[in-house]
Amino acid sequence: MKALNRISPSNELLLYGEIGAWADSLDADSVLSQLEALDSDEITVRIHSSGGLVMEGLAIYNRLKNSPKRVTVYIDGLAASIASVIAMAGDHVVMPENSWLMVHKPHLQTAGTANDLRKNADVLDSFEQTLIQIYKVKTGLPEEIIKEMLEKETWISAKDALEKGFVDEIQQPIKAAAHIDLSALKSVPKEVSQMTDAALAENKAELERVNAIQSLALKHKIPASMATNLIDQAVPLSEAKSQILEYLAEQDAKGMVGRGAVVEQNDGGPDARLEAFSEVMAARNGIGRASDFASQYMHLSAVDMARAMLEAKGISTRSMAPSAIAAKAMHSTSDFPVLLQQTGDRVMRMAYETASAPFRAVARKRLAKDFRPLTSVQLSEAPSLDLVKEGGEYKYGSMTESQESYSLQTFGKIFQITRQAVVNDDLGAFVETASRFGQAAAERENAELSKLVTSNVKLSDNKALFHADHSNLGSAGVISTTTLTEARKMMRKQKGLDGKTPIDARPKYLIVPAAMETTAEQLLAAIYSTTVAEVNPFSGMLELLVDPRLDAISETAWYLFADPAVLPCLEYAHLEAEQGLFTEIQNGFDTDSVSIKARLDFGAGVLDFRGAFKNAGA
């Protein structure tokens, strides 16, 4: 039979046919892509297969076995060879009384030298041990018993499979789904051959009925639930066609037929659909992955989504051309402009959060209520506790303070999505633009923070951030154990604002330009030493951050920073009301477009020199 791998109308994964990597076979890639598309809290797999390639089957087994969803496997007719291994991935495995399992030793069709054959024998032994462990996990049988079953090519009836633990439940007999070729297998029981040969004749009409209903469902885009009911309730094909025509007539009366895919309205409501459509728009352009719920809409075009949103607002799209639907959706009270904004916001934020921003990693974040200067007051350490003798008097202590300030600034750009792009379902440029804006926002923040460091800004004491008087400027030299030792020592010996109390500023991050990345990696790498002298004192002690923006300033200078949660040197702020990258949308009546504004209210400043160290390099 031709291999069949698809999701049935009842949302089940069908694995019918040979498992392999050739035409008309079930390859792992196609099976796994179908698994991703399943829209259910559970996975139901139906198997009717004589087996195939071991590695393809193991890939399918591992994906099912490691799924967080509950997996139920039905062996509709036969699960032989590697197909029986796939069946073992089920949390619950079911066999009808007239179905069969078959297990045997793995084999290869191979040629080559004696050395090649010896290597292949080792490979086969490894495969066999893997199969034995899989069967053992499911059945609990001893390895020697399973090994003997593989040696003999054992055919296992449903009753025996239940007794031995290969399956968990036996059901009443069902008709096999289709005929399969058993010529490649040995010792095929007569009952199995008769079962599969008879099934082809007995089920021909049933297969034609099911395939016809499935074809009608796909052609007219009727709800999957309706197709499932027609098939499961054994509705004759003529009656099924009548019911489908009645459904289409009802939809036509509502203005929802003949203009693209139908969106069911009982899918969680407008908010859930809006979120799902946004996920789909992003995922179709390579940004993120659509959830199980959103995957049901992966086939919808932008016009389909616009139509669904107009209809949800009570705006009829009957007899409207795609261009008219796009224009109406973009300039009406529908949620379509909100969808574009939400998609743009999703893409920008994902790009923003994943973009390289080393200096953001070493800075402390805060929120600002408005655009007035932000002042960070640094209190000195508490005074030491004096000895109080019996009946003695407690003395008052005092604390000193310092402060640095900075203000928020606004950065932003506008980009547009046109009616033509919606009609053409060409949203790739829109998504790509949004992604670039997200990266640009992260780049802007990192640039503002790095500029504070590389420009060596003056602090409130009228001295530069890195200054000899601040004891955070090392003897210029290439990064090495010697120069790092000096840097760590100087940071550890930093004093508090009182000028006396050690604060033990421990370095956590090492930031270098791209030119020094390899040298830094070698210095921080773990060394398995045999003598005390070979011990690498910095192995695993510092987190390496590489910023290629530094190369334009200096290819030799490098920096150390303390943990910003313990001793912050840099700080950045976002406006509290928006908390980072923010988007606004506006309809353009005179331009047939929707404009989306990306805005970033951001500010950065230096809080304290004690949490940072610089070496100018060689």
Image: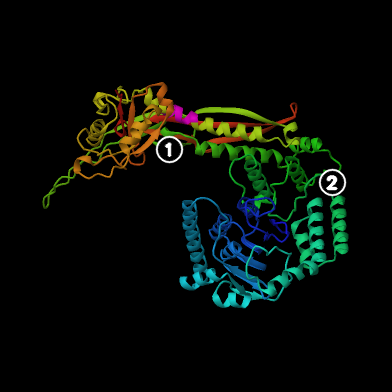
Q: Position of residue 498 (x, y in %)?
A: 23, 34
Residue on which disc 2 sits: 258
Q: Position of residue 443 (x, y in %)?
A: 49, 30
Tag 1 secondary structure: strand
Name the residue: 48% across, 53% down: 114
Magenta segment boundaries in residue numbering: 443-449
| Identity, as a three-letter code, of the amino acid under mark 1 | Lys
Q: Quadrant of residue 197?
A: bottom right
Main secondary structure along the magenta-highlighted residues: helix
- Name, please, the residue furthest toward the front: 114
Asked if residue 2 can be seen in this view, the reply is yes
- Tell me which label, 2 or 1, sits earlier in the chain: 2
Residue type at the position of mark 2: Gly
**Residue 607 is at least partly visible in this image:** no
Question: x and y percent of residue 249 in the render?
Answer: 88, 54
Q: Pick whichever, 564 or 79, lies toward us.
A: 79
Tell me the residue at 53%/58% (across/down).
66
In which image quadrant can residue 540 be found?
top left
Q: Quadrant of the C terminus?
A: top left
Q: Is residue 245 left or right of residue 606?
A: right
Q: Can you identify the residue that label 1 sits on?
A: 365
On-image quarter of the N terminus = bottom right
Q: Is residue 308 above or below residue 7?
A: above
Q: Nearer the viewer, residue 609 or 438?
A: 438
Query: 253 or 586, which lies in front?
Result: 253
Where disc 2 sits, the SS reads loop
Image vertical order of residue 401 relative to residue 267, above or below: above
Within 10 Å of disc 2 (Cα), the crowding (few <14, some 14-19, many 20+) is few
Contact? badges 2 and 1 (CB < 8 Å): no
Q: Residue at x 24, y 44 (%)?
A: 529
